[in-house]
Image (tube, rainbow, N blue to C red):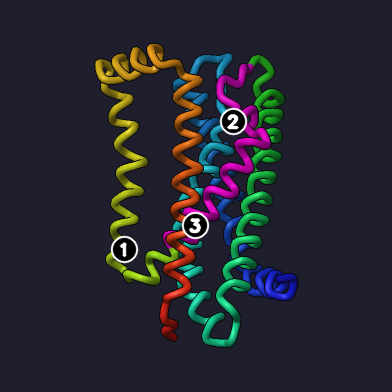
Amino acid sequence: MTGNFLIQCKTRKMEVLQFLAVAFGSYVFGIIVMMIIRANTMEENECVTLGMLIAMAALVFVHFFGIIFSFVGEFNMAISMGATRRAYVGSYALFNMAELAGLELLLFVLGKIESALMRVIYPQCEVILDLTQYFQWKYLLAVIVGMTIVELFLGAVTLRFGMKAFWAIWAIWMFVTLVPVKLIENEALAAKMHQFGMQIGFGNIVQYLVVVGVIAAVIMAVLGWNFLKKQSVTV
């Protein structure tokens, strides 16, 4: 496993650099947009860590789809060159988790820098949205493990079913990212959902979501590995 992990470190250096470029580029872009918005529309005492927010959104999107395609190509190459499936998938997943942990740390540092920068540039500024407060180990670990399982599972599905699977994944992604926003914008529906949440308890909802998430992760891990064990290699 150690040898395979070191190979991952060598072969995926460019991938890490690309993610860093996306993070820093979108971060700077977000700060500039925040300054423009604040100068024209926002109240004097309000600002948002928009640079970190945009960097996070960009990284989630690029990492999610980038890893799916990367895994598809590299899996075929590695297995055709004699690597065992168990060792390769294990080392790929381990590197992926280390990479995600590093990106989370980077986002946290960038968020703190941006928050401090806003207070220096705008002394009267109140940061009304600072995502670094949610950077707790239980959330960070869930993202690391959850994203790794989902990305490798979808990579395995794409290997198994081809581009048809990818377009299905794209449709699901668009549904998940767009539909909840539209539902929230519907005031009547949002009020009913809030009332329902109050009735059953928001704490219970979180517990149910955690249980569902764990079950889904286990199912995806098992199915993904079964797909990869039976996957024929094409180069």
| Above/below status of 119 relative to 71 | above
Circle on res. 165: 1
Residue at mark 1 to residue at mark 3: CA–CA distance? 17 Å
Neighbours of disc 3 within 10 Å: few (<14), some (14-19), many (20+):
some
Q: Residue at x 63, y 55 (%)?
A: 97
| Labels 1 and 3: the sequence-earlier one | 1
Decide whether residue 25 is among the magenta residues.
no
Instruction: From the viewer's perspective, tell me whether residue 150 is left or right of residue 139.
Output: left
Measured Cα–Cα span from mark 2 to mark 3:
29 Å
Instruction: Give amino acid for label 2.
Output: Leu
* Residue assigned mark 2: 131
The three-letter code of the residue at mark 3 reads: Ala
Q: Position of residue 51 (x, y in %)?
A: 57, 38
Circle 2 packing at 10 Å, graded few (<14), some (14-19), many (20+), is some
Looking at the rendered structure, the kind of residue marked 1 is: Ala
Q: Secondary structure at mark 1?
A: helix
Q: In the visual, does 64 lie left or right of 157?
A: right
Percent x, y of residue 143: 57, 44
- Say which of 42 and 179 sits in front: 179
Q: Residue at x 69, y 69 (%)?
A: 5
Position in image of residue 19 (x %, y %): 58, 57
Q: Element type at marker 2?
A: helix
Disc 2 or 3, which lies upstream in sequence? 2
Residue pointed to by mark 3: 221
Using a 10 Å C-alpha cutoff, classify the residue at mark 1 as few (fewer than 14 neighbours), some (14 to 19) or many (20 or more). some
Q: Which residues are magenta?
A: 125-154
Query: Is the N terminus in the top left, top right, bottom left or bottom right quadrant?
Result: bottom right
